[in-house]
Amino acid sequence: MTPADTLTDVAPVLELSGIHKQFAGIDALRDVRLRLYPGEIHALMGQNGAGKSTLIKVLTGVLEASGGQMRLAGQAVWPASPLAAQRLGISTVYQEVNLCPNLSVAENIFAGRYPRRGFAQGYGIAWAELNRRARELVARVGLDIDVTRLLSSFPVAVQQLVAIARAISIEAKVLILDEPTSSLDDDEVQKLFEVLRRLRGEGLAIVFVTHFLNQVYAVSDRITVLRNGGWVGEWRASELGPQALIAAMLGRELAAQSASAPASSAFDDAQPALLQAEGLGQSGQLQPVDLRVRAGEVLGLAGLLGAGRTELARLLFGLEAPDRGVLRIDGETVAFSSPADAIRHGLALCPEERKTDGIVAELSLRENIALALQARMGMRRFLSRAEQTALAERFVQAMGIKTASVDTPIGLLSGGNQQKAMIARWLATEPRLLILDEPTRGIDVAAKQEIMEQILRLAQAGMAVIFISSEMSEVVRVAHRIVVLRDRRKVGELPAGSSEDAVYELIAAEHV
Amino acid sequence: MSEKKTPLSVMRHRLAWPLLTLFLLLVVNTVFNASFLHVEWRDGHLYGSLIDILNRAAPLVLVSLGMTMVIATRGIDISVGAVVAIAAALAAWMIGGSVSAGVSRFPMPLAILAALGIALLCGLWNGLLVARVGMQPIIATLILMVAGRGIAQLITGGQIITIYYAPFFFLGSGYLLGLPFSLFIVVAVFALLYLAVARTALGLFIQAVGINPTAARVAGVQARRLIVAAYAFCGLCAGIAGLLISSNVKSADGNNAGQLLELDAILAVTLGGTALTGGRFSLVGSVIGALIIQTLTYAIYSLGVPPEINLVVKAVVVFVVMLLQSPEFRAEIAIWVRRPALRGMRP
């Protein structure tokens, strides 16, 4: 029996009503509601900028609401800080793992709350008890690991589960997961879902934020949708189909998926390659790879997380130095010692990690968009502020970036808008080859659609594109050719129009 | 959605608090010393406490400008004091300790170039350690901070070299158009740096590198070169400061020249509103910061604070100034003053 069936006779553990939040006179949240029942998984959905993050920050005491009411088990509460929220039993696991890699798993779980021993609840740490309790907690999230080992010795997926173990160790009543699956592969996601179901069985209310629609339906009991800071509605997951969900998020019906790749026959093998790699590799990182991209072609790089896609992109762009093989641009051998070299040859790389490798958070949107072009033009040919503004406004218009002004620090924009700005930064350099590493990760459906269409338009205009994504459906849709990687080596190439299954088969095939 | 214009909105400018601090220090000086603001024409040049402060602040302003660039790249250079000593020692040795005032060992321009050259090399060394070897800036520059004093001693042969060659004194104590010559040097360096930052992409690149070095590199900014250049420039500034100081005191003391200047420079940059975490920086702010420190030093001496406690007084004043300049602290105070009922809750 799902909680949704028992709405009438079970009291919500947490109820927010009429929540308002204003930033600098702008409504970030308007009259938003959220009800959480014990023992349910509740998906919080909305496009980028819909107010999901703001709502979660209010809920966890990071931000103070401008108005509204919050009731925890019937009691009016206002967590004044994240710590206060934790004490109330509201725990959060953020998208990026917020733990200390140089501490052991057990230390991470109990950081700040080590069990003590010795004189007067003393000065010593009860290591045996600490490790024993940590083992119990990791078992609750389905892990069987040595809790005394350093956190950094485990893969991200395990670290994510450790973060959940930490979250539930605080006798949580409400567990908030902000895009917990964005760096996990399919198996790891399934494992996470098992844990979530088990925790739901223990009576926890779980808020689940994600951009993956299929994951919503895989685990959620109910769905709350926000749009533009307002509350759209609350549904049982069984009563709101994917099309209806998207319509609720967008406020309109989704346009037919018009973007589709032209046939690969448009390119014959005699056409010279813009970029050609022969046996390009780096020991320990990537087995030698052969690769050709022609002008106007979208080359898809498919493979699971860790298959070597990002490593290949970094080698092509001069971020890492290959120790074998050759790279040719227009038939001429090149060796890039830095991204600046690659940029001079007309390459561009929109990296996977937007926050660490992409945006310069405290600089304005304008400066962020102008940065790569300015770097390409050199120090002395300075784009004046007026020129930068004109450039930025052109791309804000063209890419549909939502911002109060081009002088807004880019760190204040939503993830999807930051991503568009990163693509704009590179388009401003008018590259001949644009490498996009997971350009659609962590952004909403509508923005994804826009970015995909943009990619195809660019290719039609003669730009070569290397498109990297773990969402196979996207790769299959836009690519003229698909290069499949597995275990840091190229395992095959597929033509346009190949099905997702064909890609998966190639990935799964036993390598001889 | 324009900001509310109140008489106090001018205080939101990032330089408002440093300027207010400087103004208050000038007021304090004026209250205790009525002739503080008095400037007169004497011996063919302007004369007065303000002129004296400006002249004495010149080396600190120069070093603070260099330090600003280094800090903007997320670095720090604690070797500037030692570089001052090295440059001063080399200049003093090359000009020579001959008692006959008209003769120098090497031509003076050569001595000046050599001193600036060695300072530039020191800066390059620091920059290469940070950008190429990948050392932590504070450790990389700690090497030269410690070794530099030894190098300076080596040049001076362990002695304090007294300079008798009169033309050299012009740098640190001469006057041009009635103003200390050192001011012209400071203005020239400031103007060149300001133009480089505002009229080329240097400012944008330095900020990008300071805020997010990885992203800047991916965007094609030559981050390493910029970092090396920032340290080299900082070294050069320390070299010029070393020339001014040795010229002003007519000697070079390998042990004590520029002692603790690195800390005053870091303090000046911080007082001027540039965060030690790098990124956004303010050249004007650093100049104001340096003037604050020099004015404070002047006040401590002119108020007759006993020498044995003047460092404590300086520390207390700096502490209070830092608190007042912190927006978080002011917000906290504002709550306590205006709304006592909210005590203990967050701002």
Image: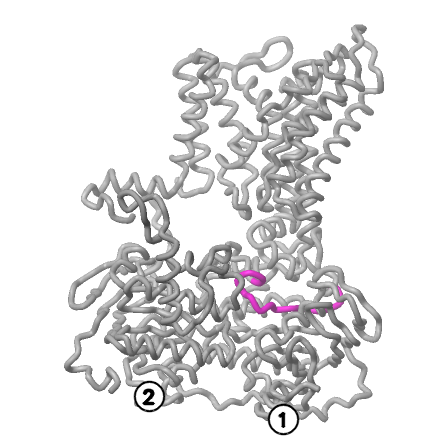
Q: In this view, does B257 lie to the left or right of B324?
A: right
Rendering coords of residue A122 (x, y %): 31, 44
Rendering coords of residue B45 (x, y %): 62, 14
Residue A88 or residue A157, whichever sits in front: A157
Distance between the alpha carbons at the discs numbered 1 and 2: 31 Å
Image mark for residue A497 = 1
Image quadrant where residue B70 sits: top right
Q: Which chain carries label 2?
A: A
Against A245, residue A95 (above or below) is above
Q: Name which residue lies at 48% across and 34% down.
A: B271
Image mark for residue A50 = none
> Most extreme residue toward the top, as rendered?
B100
Rendering coords of residue B58 (x, y %): 61, 25
Q: Mark 1 lies on which chain?
A: A
Mark 2 falls on what kind of element?
A: loop
Residue A106 visible in the displayed image = yes
Q: What residue type is labelled 2?
A: Leu
Magenta stretch containing residue B106, yes or no? no
Magenta stretch containing residue A353, yes or no? yes
Q: In this view, does A71 lie to the left or right of B276?
A: left
Mark 1 falls on what kind of element?
A: loop
Image mark for residue A240 = 2
Residue A59 or residue A303, whichever sits in front: A303
Against B13, residue A499 (above or below) is below
- Residues drawn in magenta: A344-358
